[in-house]
Image (cartoon, grey):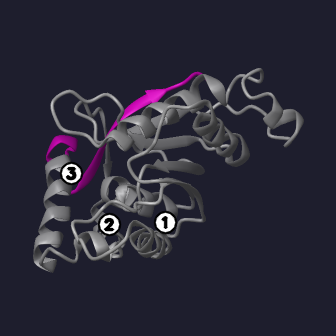
């Protein structure tokens, strides 16, 4: 994928998912003039093995880490839905919240977690967030009779997003060269200190770079991020 979208909406289940899976791509696009917006679905308040911290304390820490990571990348805005970690459900209200942001921000590309996986373990929040993001793009944000009150009451007209890129897919078909933004991606990942502090810094660096090398080997470049691409007629 060589083209740079003008506006990108990232639907991330937890703080840190976006930086790990597509941080290099976002840094590249932002450097080329794109505007990037986040919807963070949960508060991340369960993501620890530390018995001495409460969920509320962890959620507060991770909120600050997400703000710092987004600043590293140059993300323009973060919308925080605040669902409890591990409790995402495929509901009409969740779908409406995503449709609201799609119609408000009018992205060319939406990025989200791959909802359909068979050969690996995938966090339930990832599956649900990816499925609801897909449904919100098509057909709910597109068709004016879905959530018509968003138009009549909030002035948010329907919007047709052209492309979804799913990260974490088992069937990648789109690779984005991130050779020039690897250091930015790494810095954004390392901003999530609560998630990486238990690992030696060298281990974190090697992990981030090796994943990018593996994707690059498939995509024909040194470092890449891999996605499954779904295009919609606009």
Q: Earlier in the sequence, mark 3 or mark 2?
A: 2
Q: Name the residue that disc number 1 marks.
A: 31
Depth check, front residue: 219 or 96: 96
Q: Is residue 190 visible?
A: no
Name the secondary structure under disc 1.
helix
Q: Earlier in the sequence, mark 1 or mark 2?
A: 1
Mark 1 Cα-neighbour bin, 10 Å: few <14, some 14–19, many ≥20: few
Magenta range: 217-234
Residue 209 sits in quarter: bottom left
Name the secondary structure under disc 2.
helix
CB contact under 8 Å: marks 1 and 2: yes
Is residue 119 found left or right of 61 in the rendered image?
left
Q: Residue at x 22, y 33 (%)?
A: 170
Q: Earlier in the sequence, mark 3 or mark 1?
A: 1
167 in the magenta segment:
no
Place of residue 181 in the rendered image (x, y in percent of width and height, measured from the top left): 34, 66
Query: Alpha-carbon distance for marks 3 and 1?
Result: 19 Å
Q: Residue at x 51, y 36 (%)?
A: 133
224 in the magenta segment:
yes
Q: Name the residue that disc number 3 marks.
A: 221
Place of residue 82 in the rendered image (x, y in percent of width and height, measured from the top left): 54, 56
């Amino acid at each position: 994928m060589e083209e740079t979208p003008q506006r990108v909406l990232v639907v991330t289940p937890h703080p840190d998912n976006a930086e790990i899976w597509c941080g290099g791509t976002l840094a590249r696009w932002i450097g080329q003039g794109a505007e990037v917006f986040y919807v963070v679905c949960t508060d991340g308040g369960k993501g620890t093995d530390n018995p001495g911290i409460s969920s509320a304390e962890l959620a507060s820490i991770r909120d600050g880490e997400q703000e710092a990571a987004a600043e590293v990348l140059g993300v323009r805005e973060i919308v925080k839905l605040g669902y409890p970690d591990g409790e995402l459900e495929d509901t009409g209200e969740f779908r409406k919240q995503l449709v609201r942001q799609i119609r408000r921000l009018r992205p060319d590309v939406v990025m989200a977690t791959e909802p359909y996986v068979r050969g690996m373990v995938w966090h339930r929040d990832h599956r649900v967030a990816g499925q609801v993001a897909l449904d919100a793009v098509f057909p709910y944000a597109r068709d004016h009779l879905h959530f018509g009150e968003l138009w009549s009451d909030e002035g948010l007209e329907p919007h047709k997003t052209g492309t979804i890129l799913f990260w974490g897919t088992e069937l990648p078909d789109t690779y984005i060269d991130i050779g020039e933004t690897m250091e930015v991606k790494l810095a954004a990942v390392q901003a999530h200190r609560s998630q990486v502090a238990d690992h030696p810094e060298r281990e974190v660096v090697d992990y981030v770079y090796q994943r990018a090398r593996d994707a690059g080997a498939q995509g024909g470049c040194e470092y890449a991020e891999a996605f499954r691409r779904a295009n919609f007629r606009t």
